[in-house]
Image (cartoon, grey):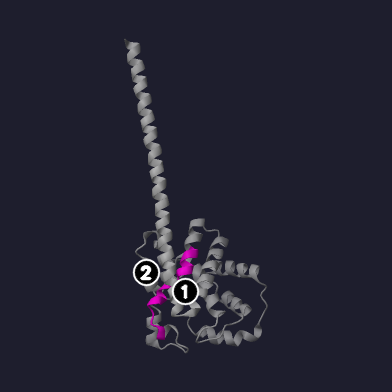
Amino acid sequence: MAARVNADSGDELTVAYRRLSAAYQQTLRYAEDVRRLYQQVQRAIYQSLLGLANALEAKDAYTKGHSERVGAWSRGVATALGLPPADVDLIGQAGLLHDIGKIGIPEAVLRKPGALEAEEWVVMRNHPLIGAQIVAPFDFFAAGALMIRHHHERCDGSGYPDGFTGDEIPVGARVIAVADVYDALTSNRPYRAALPHATVIAHLGEAAGRTLDEDAVAAFIDLMQMLSTAKADVGARPALRAASRAPLR
């Protein structure tokens, strides 16, 4: 009789184990389905944001190519700095979307061919805030929203919108800032002609550790040296001094 009880108990334990194992496997499958669905939703939201960012081209033809270059270079710099792959992806995405807030800037200000007046600068400097507000509802992009908000901050506190200094600025925003400055200075703008590559590289070197993050600048310069051989352009320095006095938009 005792032997039968033990056998029955063993059978019941085996059945219970099998049921538990089946439930566990079902839970894993459910979790994987949820993960895939969440990733699909993330991709769909990101594609929608890209669509909104691309709509800027209708207001400012410069912006699309600029954003794509800044996104790619930011990703390259983040990789060179040894940041985790997830952070590299996020920085690249934030770099691509960093100017999305310009969708909310009046065209008369955005495309003005001359220098902005003081009140127009107040309007223009809202674009990082507008951009952060656009992406803020998406929890998965919370860190990216901070990068967008702070990509015009400067290490010495001279930037905007919050006047952050040094490590107060998210590392992703510091990376994006370097790529943004380079591309802004080497691109034709309605209010200024493009400056030579070598001249802007020299400018980044001078700004490293002052307004721009030193490590990000070094990584960016190394990245650009891999893409092209920079040649000194001493004659362009007067133009650089004049252009660097005009704040970046």
- The vertical placement of 15 against 83, above or below, is above
Question: Separation of disc 2 and disc 1 at Cα?
Answer: 23 Å
* Mark 1 residue type: Arg
Percent x, y of residue 171: 48, 65
Given residues 172 and 64, the one toward you in this image is 64
Q: Which mark is residue 210?
A: none
Given residues 34 and 72, the one toward you in this image is 34
Please name the residue shown 40% across and 47% down the image. 33
Name the residue at the top extreme.
1
Q: Is residue 186 left or right of residue 109?
A: right
Q: What stretch is highlighted in magenta?
A: 91-108
- The vertical placement of 22 against 100, above or below, is above
**Disc 1, SS:** loop
Other-residue count near label 1 (Cα within 10 Å), few / some / many at <14 / 14–19 / ≥20: many
Given residues 175 and 42, the one toward you in this image is 42
Given residues 128 and 81, the one toward you in this image is 128
Using the rendered view, name the quadrant where residue 1 is placed. Answer: top left
- The chief SS type of the magenta part is helix
Q: What residue is shown with label 1? A: 154
Other-residue count near label 2 (Cα within 10 Å), few / some / many at <14 / 14–19 / ≥20: some
Please name the residue shown 41% across and 89% down the image. 117
Q: Residue 134 carries which label?
A: 2
Look at the image and tell me whether residue 137 can be seen: yes
Q: Does the magenta stretch include residue 94?
A: yes
Query: Earlier along the polypeptide chain: callout 2 or callout 1?
Result: 2
